[in-house]
Amino acid sequence: MTKANQDSGLTIGDRFSTQGRGTTFWEIEVITDIRHVGQIITFAEIGGITRMKVHVNDISTKGFHRVARSK
């Protein structure tokens, strides 16, 4: 785990939810550090096939709410 990952408090396996027509649950699949950009978080839909990449600073503005931490 990199220092940036430790600072953000996010780990692979953390679960989030979003509200749309219904509630969708997401799990962090990959955390990528990109120089001069920051961290890009890849979310995988739980029970689905959708993947979504979000900049770490945009997680709260996109409506993601933490449901559970990974162990």
Image (tube, rainbow, N blue to C red):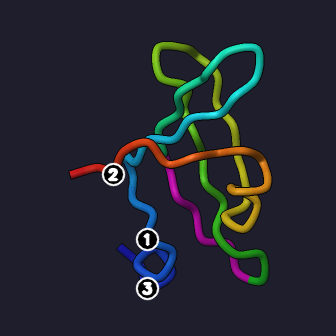
Q: Which residue is mark 2?
A: 69
Q: Amino acid type of disc 2?
A: Arg
* Image coords of residue 27 (percent x, y): 47, 38
Q: CA distance from mark 2 to mark 3?
A: 18 Å
**Residue placed at 40% from the left, 78% from the top?**
6
The residue under label 3 is 3
Q: Residue furthest left?
A: 71
**Residue 25 appears left or right of 11:** right
Disc 1 element: loop
Residue extent of the magenta highlight: 30-35
Disc 1 residue crowd, few under 14, some 14–19, many 20+, Cα 10 Å: few
Kind of residue indicated by mark 3: Lys
CA neighbours of label 3 inside 10 A, class few (<14), some (14 to 19), many (20+): few
Labels 2 and 3: the sequence-earlier one:
3
Q: Say what secondary structure mark 2 lies in.
A: loop
Q: Main secondary structure of the magenta part?
A: strand
| Placement of 13 over or under 37, stated as above or below | above
The residue wearing badge 1 is: 9
Task: Say whether residue 54 is left or right of residue 49.
Answer: right
